[in-house]
Amino acid sequence: LADGDSGVEGRGVRRRKVGGAGGKGKKRGRSGICSLHGWEWGADELFEIDSLIGKMVADGGDVPGRTRVPAGTVLYKVLWAGFPPEIATWEEEDDIPCGEIDFIAE
């Protein structure tokens, strides 16, 4: 690759310092940009699951990075392709594509 070429076409994911709550919370601004821990991406971008690294059943209390998750909801911690583990998020079972759930890391 040429110097300065990331090898990624299009906007992709950009790592840059973001303002607000120190980059610790997931945010969606008016410009359609989301951010978490200093990583940014477009609100309309689609992502590939690298692996599922955890499973939990919500008890009606707090779920990291989520709000208003009803008790009994099954969630999987998703490690996204191309992102570091600190960007992994808890996603509802219904939002995980069929076949992915069989490959949970032990």
Image: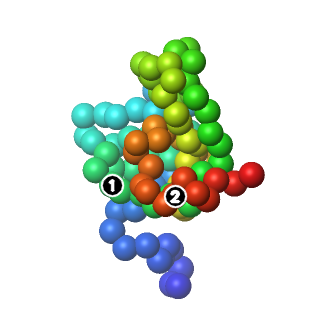
Residue 56: give x, y in percent of width and height: 61, 33
Residue at the image point whose x is 47% and y is 41% from the top: 93
Label 2: how many Cα within 10 Å (few below 14, some 14–19, many 20+)? few
Give x and y (percent) for residue 12.
40, 62
Q: Which mark is residue 45?
A: 1
Question: For the image shown, how many numbered marks are present on the structure?
Answer: 2
Quarter holding residue 62: top right
Mark 1 Cα shell of 10 Å, populated few (<14), some (14-19), many (≥20) = few
Residues under numbered marks 1 and 2 in contact, where contact means CB atoms less than 8 Å apart: no
Q: Residue at x 31, y 45 (%)?
A: 43
Q: Which mark is residue 100?
A: 2
Residue 28 placement, left or right of 83: left
Residue pictured at 48% horizontal, 28% vertical: 73
Q: Residue furthest left?
A: 30
* Residue 79, above or below 24: below
Q: Is residue 58 visible?
A: yes
Name which residue lies at 50% across and 19% down. Answer: 71
Q: CA distance from mark 1 to mark 2?
A: 20 Å
